[in-house]
């Protein structure tokens, strides 16, 4: 890896890192090893639970563990003097969560670089991992890019592909891409510092978008093809999780599989309730549910769910 060849030069590079969730943690940890991370910018702390306990972002926890100064502006477009005063050589962002103002993008002499979880220009936006699975894509990847004032439209520096397996859900793919993102940045960083990196314009005509997941997106539409139902379920597992309405109750669906049998009832009809089998008709095939979380209850396998319902109240009804 070329990073070793430039280690003496790298540790003098002053970096501001901007990120928030778990996905960004490996990137920050690798940067800390090889550069001078002088400031970490992350989203404000949140109150969670009934007792309103304060929760730090995963990135803040890493920064505090390494005694790195943390800055948490509510609106970075207004409150950014702390960053300006650092005068960094480079800014690296990864899943930060706010639009970064142009004066910050223009601040570092080596530019502002983003680690994005797709093969740009495909899947620009905030939910590229979810959308890649929901869309049924067979591959995705990581893009290291220069940031500009528009969303994920900057010049591409480097990319690395990652296949999407039929067994991947968003949690599994998230972890794969997080690791690839850190590795690719480390492989690419020396060329950014030395000014020898590629700079490839994106083809806007090929752009697609990965909009954030809405509540409406979480609802399973059994009028769709079974493969699309399957992709939605795994593309939303383990968060925020797809759901349907069974006998008036919201039931989150975490895992399912597609049978070979053709659907012979109306879409959404619960056509089979048997030991270990809970089948719902999609447009073309029957989807069998494996793992659920009924409203207000724990996650459970389908046998436990079946044991807790009256079959005669559910069989042959239609999911809403």
Image: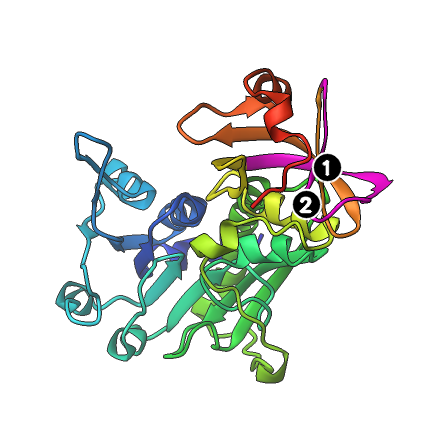
Residue 41: quarter of image:
bottom left
Q: Residue 61 versus residue 247: which sits nearer the camera? A: 247
Q: Which residue is mark 1?
A: 257
Give the quarter of the image for residue 65.
top left
- Which residue corresponds to the image point at 32% horizontal and 45% vertical from the top-left? 59
Q: Nearer the viewer, residue 283 or 175?
A: 283
Task: Identify whether 251 is placed above or below 186.
Answer: above
Q: Is residue 254 above or below residue 170?
A: above
Label 2 to label 1: alpha-carbon separation: 7 Å
Percent position (x, y) of residue 140?
64, 58
Query: Left of 201 or right of it: where is 139?
Result: right
Q: Residue at x 61, y 52 (%)?
A: 221
Q: Main secondary structure of the magenta part?
A: strand
**Image disc number at residue 86:** none
- Name the secondary structure under disc 1: strand
Dot 2, how many residues are within 10 Å of its Cα: few (below 14), some (14-19), or many (20+)? Answer: many
Can residue 89 be seen from the camera position used here? yes
Q: Residue at point 40% right, 78% down? A: 148
- Between 292 and 154, the residue placed more toward the observer is 292
Where does label 2 land, which residue? Answer: 230
Q: Along the polypeptide, which appears first: circle 2 or circle 1? A: 2
Res 66 quadrant in image:
top left
Q: Is residue 191 visible?
A: no
Residue numbers of the magenta segment: 253-275
> Would residue 55 be found to the left or right of residue 211 on screen?
left
Q: Does 259 sit left or right of 178 as displayed?
A: right
Residue 281 as seen in the image, left or right of residue 88: right
């Amino acid at each position: 890896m070329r990073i070793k060849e430039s280690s003496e030069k790298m540790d003098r590079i002053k970096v501001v890192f901007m990120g928030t969730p778990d996905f960004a943690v490996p990137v920050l940890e690798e940067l800390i090893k090889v550069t001078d991370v002088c400031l970490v910018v992350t989203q404000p702390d949140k109150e969670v639970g009934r007792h309103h306990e304060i929760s730090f972002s995963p990135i803040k926890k890493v920064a505090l563990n390494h005694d790195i100064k943390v800055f948490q502006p509510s609106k970075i477009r207004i409150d950014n003097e702390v960053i300006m005063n650092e005068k960094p050589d480079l800014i690296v962002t990864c899943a930060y969560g706010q639009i970064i103002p142009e004066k910050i993008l223009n601040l570092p002499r080596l530019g502002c670089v983003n680690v994005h979880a797709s093969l740009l220009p495909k899947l620009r936006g905030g939910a590229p991992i979810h959308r890649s699975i929901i869309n049924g894509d067979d591959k995705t990847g990581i893009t290291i890019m220069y940031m500009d004032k528009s969303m994920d439209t900057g010049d591409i520096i480097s990319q690395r592909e990652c296949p999407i397996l039929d067994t991947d859900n968003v949690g599994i793919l998230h972890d794969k891409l997080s690791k690839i993102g850190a590795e690719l940045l480390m492989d690419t960083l020396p060329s950014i510092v030395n000014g020898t990196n590629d700079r490839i314009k994106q083809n806007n005509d090929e752009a697609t978008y990965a909009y954030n997941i809405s509540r409406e997106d979480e609802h399973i539409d059994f009028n769709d093809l079974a493969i699309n139902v399957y992709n939605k379920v795994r593309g939303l597992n383990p968060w925020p999780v797809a759901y349907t309405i069974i006998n008036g109750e919201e039931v989150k669906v975490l895992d399912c599989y597609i049978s070979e049998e053709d659907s012979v009832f109306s879409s959404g009809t619960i056509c089979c309730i048997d030991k270990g089998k809970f089948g719902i008709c999609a447009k073309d095939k029957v989807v069998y549910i494996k793992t659920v979380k009924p409203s207000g209850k724990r996650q459970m396998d389908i046998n436990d769910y079946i044991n807790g319902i009256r079959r005669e109240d559910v069989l042959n009804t239609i999911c809403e």
